[in-house]
Image (cartoon, helix red, strand yellow):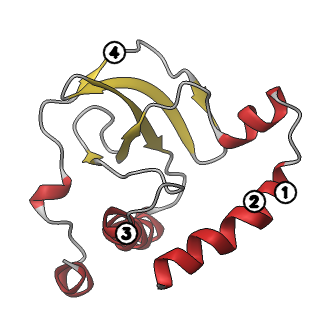
Amino acid sequence: MQHLNQTHGVLPPSMYLQGLICESKTAVAGGGFADIWIGRWEDKRVCLKVLRFFQCDSDREKLLKDLSKEVILWRQLKHPNILPFFGINTEFFTPSYCIILPWMSNGDMMSYSRQRKLDIHTKMLYASPCCIASMID
């Protein structure tokens, strides 16, 4: 997969999910680079993370190539502390790409830590080396 991506800058068809449903009429959350919508795939509630593109066409091409590398790597990662990657979609939010992830009922990491008054930086400093170490083993 990585060779196909590096050579041609395309993702394999297996990355594109079929049978995806967008349930929300508007975005339910958002950040600097993406909007979050609620979806359903294979009877599971999923997060539709719609990437925002603000660049010209040449920058967009590089961004899509970088996105391709990231999702190919992400799909191969398996760890309890890493959110699984289900796939992508380009049909609902054309011309943007949509990354499909499990729906997290507690929201994103920053919202979760604020609601529970957690020191997220301490938690991240602890969790990051643990994740990396387990991937290397």
Q: Earlier in the sequence, mark 3 or mark 1?
A: 3
Residue 23: mark: 4
Look at discs 4 and 1 and give the one toward the viewer: 1
User: What's the CA distance linking mark 2 and mark 4?
Assistant: 32 Å
Residue at image point 72% right, 33% down: 112
Evaluate if marks 2 and 4 touch, with contact meaning CB atoms under 8 Å apart: no
Classify mark 3: helix, strand or loop. Answer: helix
The residue identified by callout 1 is 121
Q: Are there few (<14), some (14-19), or many (20+) residues within 10 Å of tag 1?
A: few
Q: What amino acid does circle 1 point to?
A: His
| Residue 137 rendering spot, x and y as whole percentages | 47, 84
Q: Is residue 96 visible?
A: no
Horizontally, residue 11 falls left or right of residue 37, namely left
| Residue 48 rendering spot, x and y as whole percentages | 40, 35
Q: Earlier in the sequence, mark 4 or mark 3?
A: 4
Residue at image point 49% right, 85% down: 136
User: What's the CA distance linking mark 3 and mark 1?
Assistant: 33 Å
Evaluate if marks 1 and 2 touch, with contact meaning CB atoms under 8 Å apart: yes
Residue at image point 47% right, 69% down: 59
The residue identified by callout 2 is 124
Classify mark 2: helix, strand or loop. Answer: helix
Q: What amino acid does circle 4 point to?
A: Glu
Residue 130: mark: none
